Image (tube, helix red, strand yellow):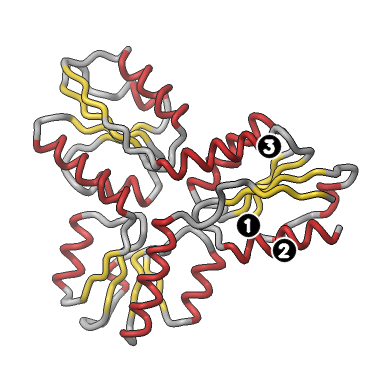
């Protein structure tokens, strides 16, 4: 079997930076907590846990008043930061710089009197962190949510960094039909995510079967898989080589491989090696 790897795939700069910060923090501190999984990849989370990183879902799970809390790449709300400081814990911020930019833009829009709307997945930690930057920020995940937007208001529109440009544009078009007095839109999409999506779609059109590697709850990986599936029905979202069912590749000679921004290179390498052995 021949295997082609997408030109852009695997760790993005924001994820690489977050992991470096986590590793350097673990070298200096004995007690380090991550507020939520540092990135959405179980292999990486397990490896860092082996080095001593303790993942908690809520600040209240930390009983000690000493130690360090790592703010993951997706960011944290103002309230969460406040609670960490009240406990007397040290903060190390590994938030992606593009997520930081998104948070600042949302807060600036709010301060300027706009009703802030973020296009994205309601349950995603990046979106939750943005919602926690100011009062009344509204999340729009689909066309149905647009019906609940206030009419005749100044709307400030931003987008979850890992959404596709197509989804952003489609939601904007629907919002425009809804009615408003003023509309301010800032493109907060990640350019790296855009490039990866473009490369993945181009590749999936050329191959018999397409594999998208990464955490099943990773938003950017799911988006890659969704886009590829539209252009190649033989697209499969797997976490790693252990999940490969060889029946998938029976009768196929050319496979394409891409990976989400939180998927380490060794996961990609192991998967490709497994394919080449078939």
Q: Quadrant of the C terminus?
A: bottom right
Residue at the farthest front position: 7
Dots 2, 1 in contact, CB < 8 A: yes
From the image, tell me which residue sits under label 3: 204
Q: Nearer the viewer, mark 1 or mark 3?
A: 3
Pick whichever of labels 1 and 3 is earlier in the sequence. Answer: 3
Front residue of 149 and 110: 110
Q: Residue furthest bottom?
A: 30
**Residue sitting at x 56%, y 50%:** 9
**Up/down of 149 relative to 247, above or below:** above
Q: Nearer the viewer, residue 152 or 256?
A: 256
Label 3 element class:
helix
Q: Position of residue 115 (x, y in %)?
A: 18, 30
Q: Is residue 136 left or right of residue 258?
A: left
129 sits left or right of 256 in the view = left
Quarter of the figure with residue 171: top left
Residue at label 2? 242
Count neighbours of disc 1 (C-alpha within 10 A) and say few if under 14, some if 14 to 19, many if 20 or more: many
CA distance separating discs 2 and 3: 22 Å
Secondary structure under tag 2 reads: helix
Left or right of 221? Residue 125 is: left
Question: In the image, which disc is placed on residue 239?
Answer: 1
Question: Which residue occupies 47% across, 38% down?
Answer: 194
Residue 169 circle label: none
How crowded pointer 2 is (Cα within 10 Å; few <14, some 14-19, many 20+) is rated as few
Q: Residue at x 26, y 51 (%)?
A: 100
Query: Residue 208, percent across and down?
Result: 79, 38
Q: Which picture quadrant has residue 165?
A: top left
For the residues labelled 1 and 3, the Cα–Cα distance comes to 18 Å
């Amino acid at each position: 079997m021949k295997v082609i790897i997408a030109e852009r795939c695997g760790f993005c700069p924001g994820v690489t930076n977050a992991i470096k910060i986590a590793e350097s923090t673990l070298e200096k501190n004995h007690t380090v907590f991550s507020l939520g999984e540092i990135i959405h990849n179980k292999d990486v989370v397990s490896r860092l846990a082996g080095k001593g990183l303790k993942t908690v879902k809520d600040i209240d799970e930390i009983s000690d008043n000493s130690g360090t809390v790592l703010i993951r790449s997706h960011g944290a709300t103002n309230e969460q930061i406040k609670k960490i400081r009240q406990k007397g814990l040290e903060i190390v911020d590994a938030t992606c710089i593009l997520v930081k930019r998104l948070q600042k833009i949302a807060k600036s829009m709010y301060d300027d009197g706009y009703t802030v709307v973020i296009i994205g997945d309601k349950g995603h930690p990046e979106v939750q962190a943005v919602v926690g930057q100011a009062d009344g920020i509204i999340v729009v995940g689909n066309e149905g949510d647009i019906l609940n937007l206030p009419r005749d208001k100044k709307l400030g529109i931003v987008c979850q960094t890992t959404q596709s440009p197509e989804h952003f544009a489609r939601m904007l078009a629907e919002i425009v039909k809804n009615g408003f007095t003023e509309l301010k839109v800032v493109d907060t999409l990640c350019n790296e995510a855009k490039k990866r999506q473009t490369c993945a779609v181009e590749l999936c059109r050329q191959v018999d079967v397409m594999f998208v590697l990464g955490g099943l709850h990773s938003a950017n990986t799911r988006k890659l898989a969704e886009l590829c599936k539209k252009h190649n029905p033989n697209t499969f979202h797997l976490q790693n080589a252990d999940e490969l069912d060889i029946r998938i590749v029976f009768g196929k000679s050319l496979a394409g491989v891409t990976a989400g921004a939180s998927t380490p290179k060794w996961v990609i390498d192991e998967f490709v090696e497994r394919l080449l052995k078939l």
